[in-house]
Image (cartoon, coloured by chain):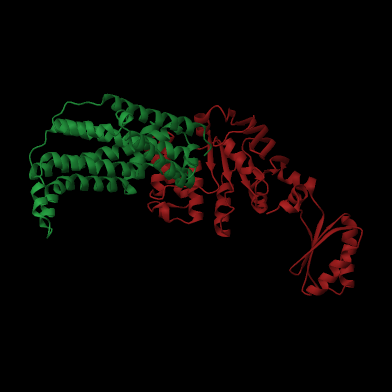
Chain colours: A red, B green
């Protein structure tokens, strides 16, 4: 049985079709990356799956529970981290986690040990008695993850968990998500491709309220991979002139110059491998780097969603 | 018991955000000041230079009735205002800040979320009114004479019911509104409506404001009652809370 099952889910806000027949299945234990440009319908989907919003039509189940009919049952099985977790500024992390423990009916001993455990997990023991009001965005996000995990949820929904964080904060949160692998099913929405590439096993790409593709990450990369090469040189003007020449070649699909670097996508890898280096030498370039690059999720995303909607 | 957990959190919030202290301090101040004002206002008038002696002659000597009237007047104005100010943001603010969404994915029913807030505010106002009543009773004893405790208790009970009416309406406004600003506007519309309609001679008899005059009459030894107004007040509280719960249950936060 799927941890998350969505069938033909629709959510209309007047004329705006936030979700337009979304289908989705997430297998238990997966870290699922829910990828899409801003406004694609990711947050709306998560809000419906957590019981905060009602769909216009369609079916949505989490851990076998119909999200429309069993609010309190659902609440005990899921964890949710909104994009901007909000707290009571006058509480301390310790009080906050203890309060959540009370809501789940934990005994005082259970609450105290779970609070300690989670504060250690998110590395907040030293600030556990400070008021949340003075916390940074990264600290709030980490506390939000702890709050979402307090009751050992079967399915954890994370809405853009690292999007607004600085690199260090992002790394911390993604590391934390990594530690959940195998413990619960994680559905993580994001528009940051690198985050999905780093932690997700399965990727679903959504645009305009519809699922464009859903597949294990590696399969997706293979299926939609575009053969590409990257070339770096010091002489930028020579590199730009060479880029113009390359655009005329029949086996080259696209050339993207960027800060002393060229990224080429090609139709025929073998021809490219054979001809690219001699052409570079002929153009008088001194190369710093030449590499056949591993196709990225960005390539897949651009193919499926289109460059105009990428953020 | 989720209700008790949420209620305890609400009480702690009342304390930590100084709401409890503000209401208690304002009520206590008005409770203490009312008999003082009744006692010394004529004295102050007399001390103003150039007041015509004819006017001074008609200023009556203050009595315990003036102390009670001053108390009722102060509480009816500032008590209602505080009841609105302390309640109108409680739900809208949480929706705006995102804490409502964060907690409603937990095993907390939406009814619990609302009713625990109302219960905590009720405790805050009841405790503060008790302080005000003790202050007023004591200063009246010192400056005038002993107040009959039974009608005074009834007067304060009736005042609490009036405050609860405005708190329930403000909570409903806060539930309907998506933002704090809208909640403030709706709460004041409720104040104007209830106050305005209540001041009409024939209808006012059945409105919450009538409870003030019932309590005052009791203090003066009268036997006049206003049970219809009392019943309607309780009805307004119940209906406002019920409608708030129904709306909140269907609302997307």
Q: How many marks?
A: 0
Left or right relative to B242: residue B227? left
Left or right relative to B127: residue A109? right
Q: Is residue A150 visible?
A: no
Residue B125 image point, x, y percent: 28, 39
Residue drawn at x 25%, y 47% as measured from the top left? B26
Which sits in the foreground, B179 or B72? B72
Is A279 rendered above or below residue B15? Answer: below
Q: Is residue B45 visible?
A: yes
Which sits in the foreground, A177 or B249? B249
For the N terminus of chain A, the quadrant is: top right
Which sits in the foreground, A157 or B51? B51
Residue A267 image point, x, y percent: 87, 54
Residue B71 image point, x, y percent: 20, 42
Residue A91 image point, x, y percent: 39, 48
Is A91 rendered above or below residue B236? Answer: below
Residue drawn at x 46%, y 49% as measured from the top left? A120
Is A271 rendered above or below residue B70? Answer: below
For the C terminus of chain A, the quadrant is: bottom right
């Amino acid at each position: 049985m799927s941890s998350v099952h969505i069938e033909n889910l629709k959510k209309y806000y007047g004329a705006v079709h936030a979700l337009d027949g979304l289908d989705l299945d997430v297998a238990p234990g997966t870290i699922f990356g829910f990828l899409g440009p801003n406004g694609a319908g990711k947050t709306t989907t998560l809000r419906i799956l957590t019981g905060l919003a009602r769909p216009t039509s369609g079916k949505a189940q989490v851990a076998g529970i119909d999200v429309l009919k069993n609010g309190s049952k659902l609440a005990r099985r899921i964890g949710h981290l909104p994009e901007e977790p909000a707290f009571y500024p006058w509480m301390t992390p310790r009080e906050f986690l203890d309060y959540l423990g009370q809501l789940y009916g934990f005994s005082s001993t259970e609450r105290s040990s779970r609070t300690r455990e989670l504060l250690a997990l998110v590395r907040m023991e030293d600030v556990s008695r400070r008021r949340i009001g003075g916390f940074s965005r990264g600290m709030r996000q980490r506390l939000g993850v702890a709050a979402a995990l307090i009751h050992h949820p079967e399915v954890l929904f994370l809405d853009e968990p690292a999007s607004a964080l600085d690199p260090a904060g992002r790394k911390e949160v993604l590391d934390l998500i990594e530690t959940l692998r195998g413990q619960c099913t994680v559905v993580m929405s994001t528009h940051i491709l690198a985050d999905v590439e780093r932690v997700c096993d399965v990727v679903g790409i959504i645009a305009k309220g519809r699922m464009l593709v859903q597949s294990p990450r590696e399969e997706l990369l293979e299926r939609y991979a575009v053969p590409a090469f990257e070339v770096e040189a010091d002489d930028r003007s020579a590199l730009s002139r060479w880029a113009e020449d390359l655009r005329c070649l029949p086996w080259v699909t696209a050339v993207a110059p960027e800060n002393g670097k060229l990224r080429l996508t090609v139709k025929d890898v073998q021809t490219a491998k054979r001809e690219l280096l001699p052409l570079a030498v002929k153009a008088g370039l001194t190369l710093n780097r030449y590499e056949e690059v591993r196709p990225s999720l960005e390539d897949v995303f651009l193919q499926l969603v289109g460059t105009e909607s990428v953020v | 018991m989720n209700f008790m957990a949420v209620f305890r959190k609400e009480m702690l919030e009342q304390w930590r955000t100084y709401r409890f202290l503000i209401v208690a301090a304002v009520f206590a101040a008005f409770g203490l000041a009312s008999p003082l004002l009744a006692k010394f206002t004529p004295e102050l008038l007399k001390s103003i230079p150039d007041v015509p002696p004819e006017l001074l002659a008609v200023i009556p000597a203050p009595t315990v009735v003036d102390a009670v009237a001053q108390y009722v007047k102060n509480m009816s104005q500032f008590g209602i205002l505080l009841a609105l100010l302390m309640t109108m943001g409680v739900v809208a603010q949480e929706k705006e800040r995102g804490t409502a969404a964060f907690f409603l994915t937990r095993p907390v029913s939406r009814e619990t979320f609302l009713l625990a807030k109302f219960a905590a505010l009720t405790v805050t106002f009841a405790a503060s009114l008790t302080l005000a009543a003790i202050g007023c009773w004591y200063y009246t004893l010192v400056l005038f004479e002993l107040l009959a405790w039974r009608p005074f208790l009834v007067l304060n009970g009736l005042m609490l019911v009036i405050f609860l009416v405005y708190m329930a309406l403000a909570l409903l406004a806060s539930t309907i509104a998506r933002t704090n600003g809208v909640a403030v506007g709706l709460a004041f519309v409720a104040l104007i409506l209830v106050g305005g309609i209540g001041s009409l001679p024939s209808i006012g008899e059945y409105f919450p404001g009538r409870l003030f005059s019932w309590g005052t009459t009791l203090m003066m030894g009268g036997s006049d009652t206003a049970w219809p107004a009392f019943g309607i007040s309780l009805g307004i509280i119940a209906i406002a809370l019920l409608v708030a719960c129904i709306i909140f249950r269907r609302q997307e936060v």
